[in-house]
Image: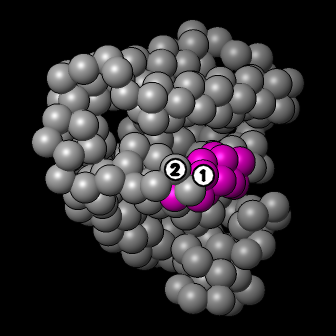
Amino acid sequence: MKGAGTDGEGVDRRGLRYVAQRSALVVLFACVLFRSAGTWDWPRAWIYLIVVSILEGLTLSLLAYLAPATLNQRGTSGSGIKRFDRVFAVLWLVLALVTPVVAGLDAVRFRWSTFSWALFGVGLVVLVLASLFGTWAMVENGYFEQFVRIQEERGHRVVSTGPYRFARHPGYLGAILGALATPLMLGSAWSFIPAGLICLLFVVRTGLEDRTLRRELPGYEEYTRHTRFRLVPLVW
């Protein structure tokens, strides 16, 4: 969601709740990953998890320092959440946990496929860029909540600075790139199936959110005439 946060706000219990949520998700992903693989001896997975943990820590630290209001808002859910976004949240969580299941079975337990370490490096670069781009969007956008809604109680308004000059939903682009980087780093071709479905979910969410903002957020329709691309600059 596009907007500006409240200056001078510090991290409160909502922000700490969000930090706990993100940390728990990484731990859950790791447990599912190694349980599916049936072994702890999986160097690619360990490196992947270390990188993800570092990037998560960097993102949360930058939000706490530069945009604490955004961090706090991501730790709560206000009124007016769109029904389609509740469905998206459930489907995303399911696919996010199916991905490590498939990766562990594919890359380690049954070895149906494998990728070279060169592709691991490609995935690493993509993951870092995706994280930095998504973090930039969250820092720039004080209304970057976890759910789609019009935040009337916070004076929701359009912002067109930072990455929002190039695409209307840059945070989703970062999420898509991160999803595609995961199979490359874990060395699992089959995990591109759930990862690809996650990307499709974000594409659908982009369209539905864009339609919502055009209809309900003052100034958004004009913004779309200046920033024409929803997700990928020069493409869509």
Q: Residues within 10 Å of mark 1 (few under 14, many from 20)?
A: some
Distance (Cα) linking label 2 and label 1: 6 Å
Q: Are marks 2 and 1 in contact (CB under 8 Å)?
A: yes
Q: Position of residue 187 (x, y in %)?
A: 37, 49
Counting every numbered tag in the picture gives 2
169 or 113, nearer to the observer: 113
Q: Secondary structure at mark 1?
A: helix
25 or 165, nearer to the observer: 25
Q: Is residue 141 left or right of residue 23?
A: right
Quadrant for the N terminus, please: bottom right
Q: Secondary structure at mark 2?
A: helix
Q: Position of residue 177 (x, y in %)?
A: 52, 60
209 or 151, nearer to the observer: 209
Residue at (51% x, 58% y) in the render: 119
Residue type marked 2? Trp
Residue at (63% x, 41% y) in the render: 154
Q: Is residue 87 left or right of residue 195?
A: left
Q: Is residue 84 above or below residue 76?
A: below
Q: In the rendered image, which quarter is residue 196 located in?
A: bottom left
Magenta highlight on residue 125? yes
160 or 90, nearer to the observer: 90
Residue lying at the far left of the rendered structure: 110
Of badges 2 and 1, the one in the foreground is: 2
Q: Residue 31 got which mark? A: none
| Magenta part of the chain | 119-134
Q: Is residue 25 visible to us here?
A: no
Question: Residue at label 1?
Answer: 121
Q: Is residue 116 above or below residue 138?
A: below
Question: Residue at label 2?
Answer: 117
Q: Is residue 117 left or right of residue 12?
A: left
Q: Is residue 185 above or below residue 174?
A: above
Q: In the rendered image, which quarter is residue 227 located in?
A: bottom right
